[in-house]
Image: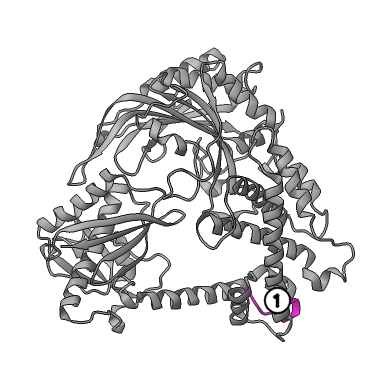
Amino acid sequence: MNSQEIRKRFLDYFAKRGHAVIPSASLIPEDKTVLFTTAGMQPLVPYLMGTPHPAGKRIADVQKCLRTDDIAEVGDNRHLTFFEMLGNWSLGDYFKKESIEWSFELLTSKTEGFGIPAEKLSVTVFEGDASLGLKLDEESVGHWMRVFKTAGIDASLGNRIYAYQKKKNWWELAGPGPCGPDTEIFYDTGAEHDKAFGEKCHVNCDCGKHVEIWNNVFMEYEKTIDSAGSVKYSPLAQKNVDTGMGFERLVMLLQGKNNVFETDLFSEFIELLPKTGLADRSKKIISDHMRAIVFLISDGVRPSNKGAGYVLRRLMRRVIVHEYLHSLGNYKVAQQSNIKPLNMEQLLNWIVNKYKDFYKELDLPAITAIFGEENNKFKKTLDAGIKELYALNSINAQAAFKLYESFGLPYEVIKEIGRERASALIYEDFDAEFKRHQEISRAGAEKKFGGHGLILNTGELKAANEEELKKVTRLHTATHMLQAALRKVLGEEVKQMGSDITAERTRFDFTFPRKLTPEEIKAVEDLVNGAVQKALSMQMKRMKIDEAKKTGALYFFKDKYPEEVNVYFLGNTIEDAFSKEFCGGPHVKNSSEVGTFKIVKEEAVAAGVRRIRADVL
């Protein structure tokens, strides 16, 4: 079964069961606080929250998605930037019974489905959480026992049906909103268990023997958070089903391939690439990135130096760099007649032809014109960088970083083209130089107290007078409290990416994938102001760094610290502190001195990074 047939069979199956088949939303979401559509459910969130969908209560779709967190990892057998998600949705209509029955039938039926042997499948369910008043998902267990029985398989809890804790089989937003248990379907690849991942294999093991292929989320609860940060789960009036299945992984399994690049989604494209002179990793990077480029341009993105345009430019330049690695630039290609530059237009044309029947928006003239223009511009920069490289007698880490900073030459190009000149250059030294310059840049930005107190002992706290110093100190403590509150409301995925504190405001950047809701912002403010009203004492304890980390105190993971650090914590003890962080000070003596905390603005600053501006009154 080819990929087009797999996509069609999925949609036809649900169309026959009363689902409206809707087109994919754009890769550029309507919510401008996030750069890309990164999951199948993202465009449907308003309807899962209760807004009626114009197409009805039963929906099926194939959603194009783009994730850029792992761009540097692309080139192995696992990571992709662009991918498709298959999904079916019930918006207050059917629930667990139908969802589980249809998932099983579609996967196993030889006539209407994909014909996967039922004995190859295992499933997981939510085991419950007594501390939160949540019970084992017995309803899903019962439905799975019944559908396995139709295939002649006796399944029970602990035998083909396995219960896992909340972090594995529960879905919820970081803040308040609909949530519920999920049930995941796994395929047994038949591979041997790798004991590097544990003595014994289990269905949720990372060894690769069992591969997750489909997730059914049952939204039957509403999560609320009170001003003290306590979480409560209550039954939801409108129960929804949200399912997601990775298209590329499904194609790989159904076509019996070892990785996605061997499937018909990529294999014919890779056949167009040179058989010699192009590394396997480069082939995978070019294959993945050019597919993403085609869809981004067709959704209206243009190369630029910010936002989605910057991501597009980065993807384009990685392709161009790997083409350079193949041809070794204008300097080497003439000496190696068997190596020819890649035919970029031919490659782009193949991708468009592969997908145009399903994605009508693909615009080949625009794609080739925009890619060609960027290709020509960047190659001129690369040529200038190569000339500079050839002017050097030897290339150490400092020289390599200068070539990278000035001309965009990455380490691989410098190493490959530099040859003997770069024989002593190793990646670890280049990476260390890169990080050193990052630190210099960050230190410069921290002169306005951007280091969140970490470099204060150098005297770089900037305040024009004593009054400003008092205000900055209040804001500094408030910033610690803000981070603690964000993690309580949104979850521990929140990590500080930077801060900047002046007498006018605090600015705090942190990792989070979406815009905060008004309810989440209020919950954060209430937590901070609640701690202010409790008049908690600010204390400092000097500790060995390993001991400090064990307390759970927050710190910059990429920073280097001395053997002993100062941990500032707000509360009676470090164990039950409201907030605790590695820090250099200064801070107020008591949280009551902070004053009323107010979030002024919340916005996106990069993919997966949010920014809060706040003040104290």
Residue 580 position, x and y percent, is: 25, 62
Q: Secondary structure at mark 1?
A: helix
Residue 597 position, x and y percent, is: 18, 58
- Residue stretch rendered in magenta on the structure: 418-426
Image point 60% across, 59% down: which residue?
313
Residue 412 position, x and y percent, is: 67, 68
Mark 1 highlights which residue?
384
Query: Which residue is farthest right?
Result: 337
Residue 289 versus residue 123: which sits nearer the camera? Answer: 289
Residue 338 position, x and y percent, is: 89, 62
Colouring scheme applied when the structure was drawn? one colour
Residue type at mark 1 is: Ala
Instruction: Identify the image quadrant of residue 172.
Output: top left
Q: Is residue 247 visible?
A: yes
Q: Is residue 380 left or right of residue 477?
A: right
Quarter holding the C terminus is: bottom left
Residue 136 lies within the magenta run: no
Quarter holding the N terminus is: top right
Residue 143 versus residue 412: which sits nearer the camera? Answer: 412
Residue 425 lies within the magenta run: yes
Q: Is residue 573 above or below residue 298?
A: below
Instruction: Identify the image quadrant of residue 140.
Output: top left
Mark count: 1
Q: Is residue 497 above or below residue 164?
A: below
How packed mark 1 is, by other alpha carbons closer than 10 Å (few <14, some 14-19, many 20 or more), is some
Image point 47% across, 15% down: which residue?
146
